Image (cartoon, rainbow, N blue to C red):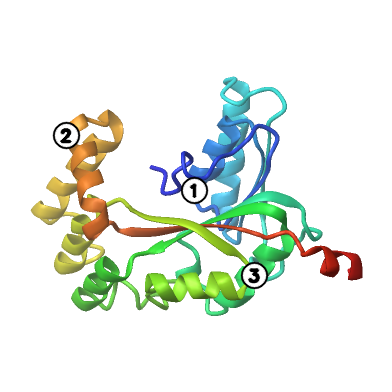
């Protein structure tokens, strides 16, 4: 289930991609399939080991084009172990809401991105997230949980402040908002509640079968209750005078 829309965020074979806070690796895998040179980085060593196994399996199965590479590694988003301008593309999906120093993370992403490169940032959307917080303290008051809810204008302002130029936004995963509302209402750890189990089956069916009815429904509902807010931005080239001075 991808949150980044690659029709709005084009990726070319050979692009150097950093999936920052990659989690289970869903975006890293897609970039690898598209022929990129991918680095998937996360602070969770267990998840990184699983991502590395999947990279190896994809290579063995011939899922990645010739020339594509994939590396999974542990790392700190606030101290990335890469030189300046190392990447053409940076993706950070559902991560910034967990990190106290979100401006520091943005600064690191900008540092390792080449001029003219592109960044995709996704965070939980304000409205659906606010409902979750209202229904359940356990949803967010956990170690490593969500510490803030972004309004779209606030996130875009931080992106611009970091020196990036936003060029597009959208919302995603509308069908997942009601699922999390049910989870929060019946108990975040209570997977046995009938409404939660029934809705989960619907989501699995949707993900596996991709029926037209749910695709159309989600597209129509995304502007209203999309679970994620997605922003795309570029790192501008230095003006000639600044480049000469540098």
Mark in the foreground, 2 or 1: 2
Q: Which residue is mark 2?
A: 213
Whichever of labels 2 and 1 marks the residue nearer the N terminus, that label is 1
Q: In the displayed image of the protein, which residue is found farthest to the right?
A: 245
SS for dot 3: loop
Q: Position of residue 237 (x, y in %)?
A: 73, 59
The residue at 33%/65% (across/down) is 125
Q: Quadrant of residue 15?
A: top right
Q: Position of residue 48 (x, y in %)?
A: 59, 50
For the residues labelled 1 and 3, the Cα–Cα distance comes to 29 Å
Q: Is residue 120 above or below residue 34?
A: below
Q: Is residue 19 visible?
A: no
Q: Which residue is mark 1?
A: 24
Whichever of labels 1 and 3 marks the residue nearer the N terminus, that label is 1
Q: Which residue is mark 3?
A: 163
Assess disc 3: are there few (<14), some (14-19) or many (≥20) residues with their C-alpha within 10 Å of its C-alpha: some
Q: Quadrant of residue 150?
A: bottom left
Please state which of residues 160 and 104 is positioned toward the viewer in this rendering.
160
Q: Is residue 117 above or below residue 67?
A: below
Marks 1 & 3, CB-CB < 8 Å contact: no
């Amino acid at each position: 289930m991808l949150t980044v829309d690659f029709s709005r965020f084009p990726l070319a074979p050979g692009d150097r991609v950093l999936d920052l806070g990659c989690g289970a690796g869903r975006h890293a895998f897609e970039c690898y399939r598209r022929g990129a040179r991918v680095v998937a980085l996360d602070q969770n060593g267990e998840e990184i080991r699983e991502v590395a196994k999947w990279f190896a399996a994809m290579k063995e199965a011939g899922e990645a084009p010739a020339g594509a590479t994939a590396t999974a590694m542990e790392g700190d988003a606030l101290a990335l172990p890469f030189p300046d301008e190392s990447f053409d593309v940076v993706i950070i999906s559902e991560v910034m809401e967990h990190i106290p120093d979100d401006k520091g993370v943005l600064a690191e992403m900008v540092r390792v991105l080449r001029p003219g490169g592109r960044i995709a940032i996704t965070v939980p959307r304000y409205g659906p997230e606010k409902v979750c917080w209202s229904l359940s303290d356990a949803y967010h008051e956990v170690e490593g949980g969500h510490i803030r809810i972004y309004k779209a204008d606030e996130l875009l302002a931080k992106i611009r402040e970091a020196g990036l130029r936003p060029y597009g936004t959208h919302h995603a995963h509308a069908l997942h908002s009601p699922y999390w509302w049910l989870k929060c209402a019946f108990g975040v750890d209570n997977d046995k509640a009938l409404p939660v189990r029934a809705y989960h089956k619907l989501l699995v069916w949707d993900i596996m079968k991709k029926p037209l009815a749910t695709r159309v429904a989600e597209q129509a509902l995304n502007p209203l209750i999309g679970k994620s807010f997605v922003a795309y931005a570029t790192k501008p080239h230095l003006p000639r005078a600044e480049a000469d001075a540098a």
